[in-house]
Image: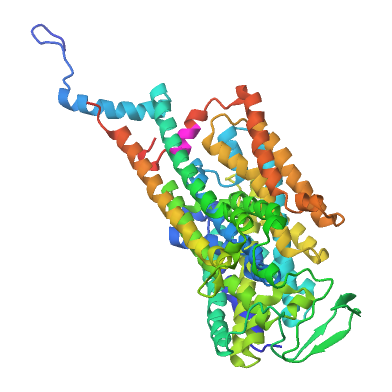
Amino acid sequence: MGGDGTPERTRVVLGELAARRRPADRSHADLAEQTPVGEALVKGLVRAQLALALRLALVVVTGLGALPLLFVAAPAVGSVKLFGVNLPWLLLGVLSFPFLVGVGWAYVRWAERNEQDFIALIRKPEQ
Amino acid sequence: MNPYLVPGLILVVVVTVGIGAYGLRFARTTSDFLVASRAVSPSWNAAAISGEYLSAASFLGVAGLILRYGVDVLWYPVGFAAGYLALLLFVAAPLRRSGAFTLPDFCQVRLRSTALRRLASVFVVFIGCLYLVPQLQGAGLTFTTVTGGSYVWGALLVGVVVTANVALGGMRAITFVQAFQYWLKLTALAVPVIFLVLQWQSDGRPAVDPPAGGVFPAATSVVIEQDATVDGVEVHKGQQLFYDEGDPVPRVSTVDARFGPQWLLPGGERTLFATYSLILATFLGTMGLPHVLVRFYTNPDGASARRTTLVVLALVGLFYLLPTLYGVLGRVYTPQLLMTGHTDAVVLTLPEAALGGGHLGRLLGALVTAGALAAFLSTSSGLLTSVAGVVFTDVLRAGRGGSVRDFRMATLLAAIVPVTLSVYVSNMDVSRVVGLAFAVAASSFCPLLVLGIWWRGLTDLGAAAGILIGGGAAMVAVLVTVLGPPLDGWAAQLIGQPAAWTVPLAFLVMVIGSLLTGRRVPPDVGATMLRLHAPESLRI
């Protein structure tokens, strides 16, 4: 090898392919190696998920948590009858459960969307 | 005695042991025993979690409380269900991604502290026992109520069946057993309630809470169990009182119950503190119950942990629609329970009381009793598995490489204390002790999990201080309530329903403690956060 006349070996890489792969790898590596960029990406995801959870918790706190106060502030609400049943019985004994499930369903949907966005952000080639 | 009863109960025990044995054929490794090798589908897993969660307190206690206290205690079932929403919002997916199997594992993964791990183990065992004893007690009391047999035999029977099942089959078998038991419990309440409501319709819809007070629906005899006054007349222990159909129901001085508008309408300012305390304890306590968390490890990934939790919320919510109806109809058909104070028995006695002693009433009576047995079996199995898991890894120090024999040994060790306690302590208030277990969990593990998952600044010292001060205060309140003298006034409210001050206290101490010891934040917190929150599909 390396005799006279023969050029030295050079590594040839398809330029287009290398350029396309590297940015995706970089985000991935940023995450895995805990660079400041990776740290910021994770912080963004955590913040988005926490904001979502807190927002939905607030919905439950105002929807259910305010009921005892409402019953104290406006005792007349307790005597209102719907289908022959006093409103507090209907609200707590029946309607609270579908309400909780509805909030949970919305959370699962949006939390998964946040994760999809995060994955898209990591995998998206930087151009 | 009801002739369908014994065959029904034997059937439940045989099917439970049978499914356990069937599961055993697949349980070969320690991993099978501890986590069912994570090969459980979300729908099975959700039914199993619900089956495990719906305990004696849910199956018997909620209806009994509603019969006694009315609309204010509807917060118990609402809170028991809402606890799963809090779990879903703040804990489910990250906890699964952390790879922690128990709460002590989570301490190790997140804060790298063995001392904190030990502390968490102590709390897991305390909460587990606090929750396990009333289950066995409930079993003993049901045994006495329904068969007239001895309390000790009922408690021991359930204790032995549960210990054997967990020791032989571990988690893999228990998953199938508990999924079956959820559907059994739902059927056992749903089918009789259809007949009960139809009966109520055909009786001309008697008023649930008539202004003039309730009346006996049939001739009834009541045995007085302690000296008291009945509508102003003194009665003595052992005396038997007879009432005819249509007689007004008298009030007994020793039994705490509400009547008229007090039962029908929300309590207002008087009960506001207790109501909010209960809401805090149940909403935030569920995520800290040891037997609930263990289940999340059996999901394959974070997203499926989330979906499983949502299904659990729906299944549990569906179940809690039913006990309310039992409590309300109990006002019409079993008013004598308000005289004896055995309101927890309303679910068991209502079918025969409303539908008569014919075949239908007895068959449905046997069905609800079978459901109650399923409730004791499944919750105690789950609790025992999780306490045994902690004893296995932290007391016997077996670790993941430990043998199946070590796990069986741990199960026996974990079962001895609660079973012994339940035999000797028979007069503790069942549903109240369960509520207190929630308060301890909400003031110790809830802040640990929520801050650990969402806040980078949490340190091991801060977490330990929060658990010791917040959880310790709740623990002391529990011990005073259970063992101490009766209290009244504000002290009774603060000690009897401690969550409203112990939960904020725990959060506060944990945050301040962590800020003061900021240098002890684990250096790999960034990697841990990534692991907790990044979707698995990225494969980092």
Q: Kindly identify the residue that appears in the image at 82 percent across and 53 percent down.
A: B489
Q: How is the image coloured?
A: rainbow
User: Which corner quadrant holds the C terminus of chain A?
Assistant: top left
Specify the quadrant of the image occupied by residue B451: top right
Q: Position of residue B340 (x, y in %)?
A: 79, 77
* Magenta span: B528-533
Q: Nearer the viewer, residue B423 or B54?
A: B54
Whether B471 is drawn above or below B210: the answer is above
Q: Nearer the viewer, residue B174 or B57?
A: B57
User: Which corner quadrant holds the N terminus of chain A?
Assistant: top left
Q: Nearer the viewer, residue B98 or B222?
A: B222
Farthest residue to the left: give it: A5
Q: Is residue B336 visible?
A: yes
Q: Position of residue B296 (x, y in %)?
A: 52, 51
Q: Is residue B39 visible?
A: no
Which SS does the magenta portion mostly show? helix
Left or right: B16 as drawn, with respect to B263: left
Q: Kindly identify the residue that appears in the image at 48 percent across and 34 percent down.
A: B529
Whether B121 is drawn above or below B214: the answer is above
Whether B275 is drawn above or below B113: the answer is below
Farthest residue to the top: give it: A4
Q: Position of residue B294 (x, y in %)?
A: 57, 52
Specify the quadrant of the image occupied by residue B245: bottom right
Q: Position of residue A43 (x, y in %)?
A: 44, 31
Q: Kindly identify the residue that appears in the image at 49 percent across and 49 percent down.
A: A59
Q: Is residue B198 magenta?
A: no
Whether B162 is drawn above or below B527: the answer is below
Left or right: B496 as drawn, with respect to B296: right
Left or right: B74 as drawn, with respect to A109: right
Q: How many marks?
A: 0
Q: Kindly identify the residue that appears in the image at 56 percent across and 41 percent down.
A: B450
